Amino acid sequence: MSGIDECLLAAMGLSGARGAAVVDWTSGLALGTIGSAVSGDHEVTAADTAELARTAAEQVTLAEAARPSAPAATDPPDASGPPEPAVEDLIITTRDGYHLLRFVETAFDSSVFLHLWLDRRDGNLALARIRLAELARELVLS
């Protein structure tokens, strides 16, 4: 379990990482930042990426596609807990980089995501996606 600062430091340890942030997608505020900001200003970048995250998270079409079919009446109840979110992450590809937005699940009604900006030449998108998912699971918000 790690806090925001530890999570961001770990994200910056990834090859090709240029910047990272923990952002509240309802308000567009950065809860923590490290490294460079895409726009040169972390708050502007947080607000812009929050718009993308909010759009994806609120899409009914995506949520319906991710929802499993209804269980049969004879199936035992699912004791595994609440359903997984419809959208786990977003990947935006630009000419010189990748932007990964990973939604963070919490015990409370969470509206937080991790944003990682990777250099396209030096970054490993697949590895970064796996590591960001791990960091999101380990992140403790208080």
Image: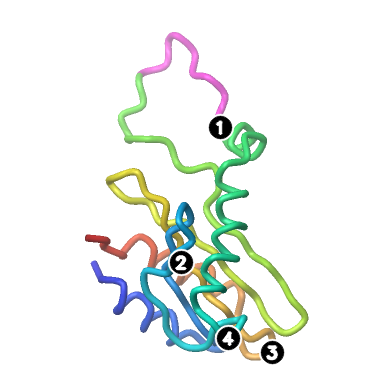
Disc nearer the start of the sequence (1/3) = 1
Magenta residues (range): 68-76
Q: Amino acid at mark 3?
A: Arg
* Residue marked by disc 3: 121
Q: Is 72 included in the stretch rendered in magenta?
A: yes
Q: Label 1, label 3: how many angstroms apart (C-alpha)?
A: 36 Å
The quadrant in which the N terminus is found is bottom left
Q: Nearer the viewer, mark 4 or mark 3?
A: 4
Q: Earlier in the sequence, mark 2 or mark 1?
A: 1
Q: Which residue is mark 2?
A: 114
Percent coordinates x, y for residue 75 in the rendering? 42, 16
Rendered view: 115 above or below 52: below
Q: Which residue is mark 4?
A: 40
Task: Check contact, mark 3 vs mark 2: CB within 8 A.
Answer: no
Q: On residue 137, which mark appears?
A: none
Residue 126 drawn in magenta? no
**Front one among 52 and 27:** 27
Secondary element under disc 4, as helix, strand or loop, is: loop
Looking at the image, residue 1 sits to the left or right of residue 10; the answer is: left
Q: Which residue is mark 1?
A: 67
Under circle 1, the secondary element is loop
| Residue 66 located left or right of residue 113 | right
